[in-house]
Image (cartoon, coloured by chain):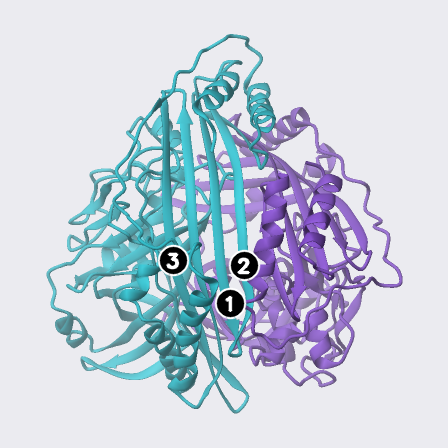
Amino acid sequence: MNFETMKQALVAAAERAGLTDYEIYRETEEQVSVETLKNEVSAFSSGVSGGVCFRCIVNGKMGAASGELLTEEAMEELVARAVANAAVIDSEDVPEIFAGSPSYAKPTAPAPTPADPAEMKRVALALQSATYAACNKVGDGTQSGTVSTVREISLFNSKGLSLSNRVGITGAWVYAAVRDGEEARDAYRSRRGLDEAALAGLPREAVDRALAQLGAAAVKSGKYNVVFDGEQFREFLGTFSSVFSAKAAQMGLSLLAGKEGEQIAAPIVNLTDDPMREGAAMQTPFDGEGVATSRKYVVENGVLKTLLYDLTAAKKAGVASTGNGRRGGYASSVSIYPYHFGLSAGTDSLDDLLAAAGEGIYITACKGFHAGASEVTGDFSIESEGFRIRGGKRAEPIRSFTVAGNFFDLLKNISRIGNTVCWSPLGGFTCFGSPDILVPDMSIAGEA
Amino acid sequence: MIRKQLAEEALSIAISTGADFAELYAENTRNNSVSLMDGKIERVGDNLLSGAGIRAFLGVKTVYASTSDLSREGLLKCAAAVAAAAGDLKHTAAVRLRERIFPNVHPARRIPTDADAKERADLLREGCFAAKEYDETISQVSGSLMGVDHTILIANTEGLYATDRHIRTRIAIRAVAARGGENQDGFYGPGRGMGMEMFETIRPADVGREAARQAVVNLNAGYCPAGVMTVAIENGFGGVIFHEACGHSLEASSVSIGASQMAGKLGQKIANEKVTAIDDGTIPNAWGSVNIDDEGTPTQRNVLIENGILKNYMIDRLGSRRMGMPTTGSGRRQDYTFEATSRMTNTFIANGPDRNEDIIASMEYGLYCKNMGGGSVNPLTGAFNFAVNEGYLVRNGKICEAVRGASLVGTGSEILMNIDMVGQNLDCGTGMCGAASGSIPTNVGQPLIRVSTITVGGR
């Protein structure tokens, strides 16, 4: 059943049910991935999936139901389920089926084309052999791969709005495992595209990163000046992005509630959300409710300019939606998320930041954000690895320590910002980006 | 869902170009949820997921294709995609399937996705209301009540044709306590592999009060000091320590390719002799239980570590081929868009020889972790970290003031050796585990244990 037929069946069912306000949201995805192990392609996978969500307003409440089974009967049932579900809602939020924005941006990213599986295999194998060739310490567990995804979103509603967006991303990754005696270290690198010349540096980067951690020692607990690699700090932005949700603020779940217009970060801090970011593979001209998206400063010169809104939160606050009513997939309800959310570049090189830190710690890997960070409190305690900074230069590798603090304090304490923003290479509609940053006096827990 | 004859046809196509084994997995999954925030039901989730995946093996190489189109045409197209990627040989292989019925040891009386949404909403309200009433500092309560009705079909070229049905119910409540511009939260989310009858033993109000209690404790707590300490970790979700520190490193997905620190260590002492650890997918109605795994193998009680000696790994079909060892019924996946791989079910440290009161009494200074949060691990290095959701300092054998913001950091091999006391109050906690084959329900568990030294991250 194609989208047109499905739409007709749903519209007919909605009319039979006497509905006047409804919306049909369809999302499909085609993906191909290749994985290598040792010197051969060990796994090849392809998938076509997709489903539809039907939402409708009944007695002032929004009901929804979704599914992947796309028969006439299933469409009839979908409408019935959505109507029944609306009856359970007692939230006083005022739902809306959106009539449309005056205009929608045109994506500048090239139209997606599914990657050629043969090329994906060839590139993955070439990366794998280059990774093994980079150093004789590279061993078992090392893998390379390629991925390709094409996603299509269509939205149609009873107010006459009809929108669609088709995007795709292709890329490659290398996971290098290196060993020296009993010690093992690893690193993961990824990049967009399948162009072999552009990917040529990837294996070396992964191997060098893993090798650099060999011999890493524990570090003494204490307060240190910390330089966060941009690739790591963007993970902090991702973890804490929900504090910028107006809904979270309205519900008392974000400490930024009531702080629009106030200084919440150091004056050098600028945070933007850019759905149509130039150079991004997946750009988003309209959100999950059909509202046009736009680039905005969330924090400008340290001042919280706006929170992120969907239609419901905007209505409650008496402002316009910022076009951040997102859907995580066809089956997900509308929630507030940023798109390409990043800390703007400053002027310092990495060497400048290390020099300014003097004595300190350069953090190049962090993990376990889902366990070690709370958006409600802003507190974090994150397992990290990296290097000591001695005499303003990168020194010996260190591991198994945590960096702890509070995100809201951290925003105020950023003292210098690097000159290059690193965006997550294989992120989709949502990407986080950050330059390297310097934060003085962070708590580090290592050995006594 | 898919008739035997169509499954036979699809599998014959999948192996028509040289694969030596093919498997078809199909599912219909109904997911229902009600969500509450600020005292009001604001969302009802209602999704019917359906699709299939076909996998072929060529030795230890795999080809997988999946589709949400369960029509004959969609399924055969999926099989053809597998055949095209698997090779260019041409041979015809007839596949003959025989239906096999596995006993259901996880019966459900009242299917949660069939239960009246109003009933589910009322249970959730009861839980959230109790959380709000717990203390005047409770500023916000959110919660959800989820039900899953998951029917799977597995057929393979060894002749297996089997279906299974997993029913799951879970209630999860988060409470926030606030005072003077500061927030702290607490969470409790028990679930079972059963229907709405779960609420005959798990009272929503108790769930709400437990979430609120944790939030209030944390609001009144100071920050945890950082450093290397002796730590006691309580039962239930405390078992996340074993899940992260060791469980993932015992999965065939990393062991079989040499990417685990536990590879090649069968028969060796890898833990303190007080440690016996088990992965058991057969516990009736437990959250992580299934009758058969997502490759059609019955689950089992798999002793991983016995008195400190590594006895077995968790092995799926591909891992079995790579390692030359039998599958342990550990092949699991979130849904048809993922290939199954080796995963945990209900994984726990068994009761040990120590009395719980002796464990606390033995600690001169340290941290008592009453409730743990989630965590993550790198199987290659064994490095893990996890959050302590509710912790107390211990001085001179007595549990003292609450501390917040702690995390435990270490490596699997170190901590297993350092678990030097194991208590006797084994209990399990409910979790979702994310890995290569998606997010799946798993239980973690243990009795109270003592870890002689571990790095505590705090500030």
Of mark 2 and mark 1, the one earlier in the sequence is 1
Q: Is B410 above or below relative to B209?
A: above
The CA span between labels 3 and 1 is 14 Å
Mark 2 lies on residue: B45
In the rendered structure, the colour chosen for chain B is cyan
Q: Please state the chain letter of the residue tagged with numbered disc 2 in the rendered image.
A: B
Left or right, B275 with respect to A211, comes to left
Q: Please state the chain letter of the residue tagged with numbered disc 1 in the rendered image.
A: B
Characterize the local packing of mark 3: few (<14), some (14-19) or many (20 or more) Cα atoms within 10 angstroms.
Answer: many
Secondary structure of the residue carrying tag 1 is strand
Secondary structure of the residue carrying tag 3 is strand
In the rendered image, is residue A215 in sight? yes
Residue type marked 3:
Thr
A112 or A161, nearer to the observer: A161
Residue type marked 2:
Gly
Task: Examine the image and state in which quarter residue B445 appears.
Answer: bottom left
The CA span between labels 2 and 3 is 14 Å
Residue type marked 1:
Ser
Of mark 2 and mark 3, the one earlier in the sequence is 2
- Residue A393 in the image: state x and y as whole percent: 61, 63
Q: Which chain is purple in the picture?
A: A
Secondary structure of the residue carrying tag 2 is strand
Check residue B169 in the rendering and tell me which mark sits there, or answer none. Answer: 3
Would you say the residues marked 3 and 1 are in contact, meaning their CB atoms lie under 8 Å apart? no
Would you say the residues marked 2 and 1 are in contact, meaning their CB atoms lie under 8 Å apart? yes
